Amino acid sequence: MPRAAPRLCGCGYKIASGSLCPCERQRARQRKAKADANRPTARERGYDSRWQKERAAFLHERPYCERVMPSGELCGRRATVVDHVFPHSGDQRLFWDRRNWAPLCRTCHSGWKQSEEKRAPLPFIH
């Protein structure tokens, strides 16, 4: 299968298709740092001591990752993250609704779940 031709970055670098130029990487780092600086802290977003207690109780009740793998089986690794199935976006009712929680292992939450949300954000449901 033919590969796409290299491209020229605005700064003059010849870049392989699908790659980032050093100047593009730098701009991406700066954009992420700016977004992180403006983001409220975890505590400000509701992840406080009350959350830690509820999270621990939930993971005690449901200790294994419940992500359904492409094979149809559950992941089954030890869950360490309580995921909000539908993003709560600050809605406290949705934040504390246990029906909206799912136990996930760190790998499934940091890999699969995050890429799913970037690809097709889940709808906000009340």
Image (spheres, rainbow, N blue to C red):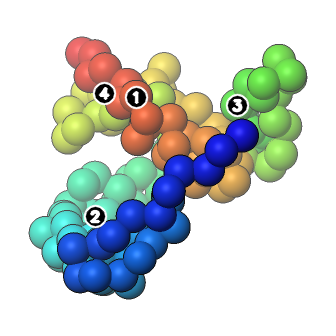
Whether residue 120 is situated above or below residue 39 in the rendered picture: above
Of the residues under marks 1 and 4, which one precedes in the sequence? 4
Residue 29 visible in rendering: no
Query: Front-most of 70 and 13?
Result: 13
Q: Secondary structure at mark 2?
A: loop
Q: Considering depth in this image, is 23 or 42 the residue closer to the camera?
A: 23
- Residue hosting label 2: 43
Q: Quadrant of residue 10?
A: bottom left
Marks 2 and 1, Cα distance to the nearest angstrom?
A: 27 Å
**Residue 22 in the figure: left or right of residue 62:** left
Check residue 94 in the rendering and tell me which mark sits there, or answer none: 4
- State how far apart marks 1 and 4 are (Cα): 20 Å
The image shows residue 34 at horizontal and vertical percentages of 17, 74
> Which residue is at the far left?
38
Residue beneath the point at 31% across and 20% down? 123
10 Å crowding of disc 1: few (<14), some (14-19), many (20+): few
Q: Secondary structure at mark 1?
A: loop
Sequence-first tag of 2 and 1:
2
Q: Residue 12, percent across and down?
A: 28, 82
**Which residue bears the numbered disc 3?**
67
At x 36%, y 81%, the residue is 13
Residue 54 appears in view: yes
Q: Which residue is mark 1?
A: 120
Q: State how far apart marks 4 and 2 are (Cα).
A: 17 Å
119 sits left or right of 16 in the view = left
Q: In the structure shown, which secondary structural element does the residue marked by tag 4 occupy?
A: helix
Q: Secondary structure at mark 3?
A: loop
Q: Residues within 10 Å of mark 3 (few under 14, many from 20)?
A: many
Amino acid type of the residue tagged 3 in the rendering:
Arg
Q: Amino acid at mark 2?
A: Arg
Instruction: Tell me the quarter of the image containing the N terminus.
Output: top right
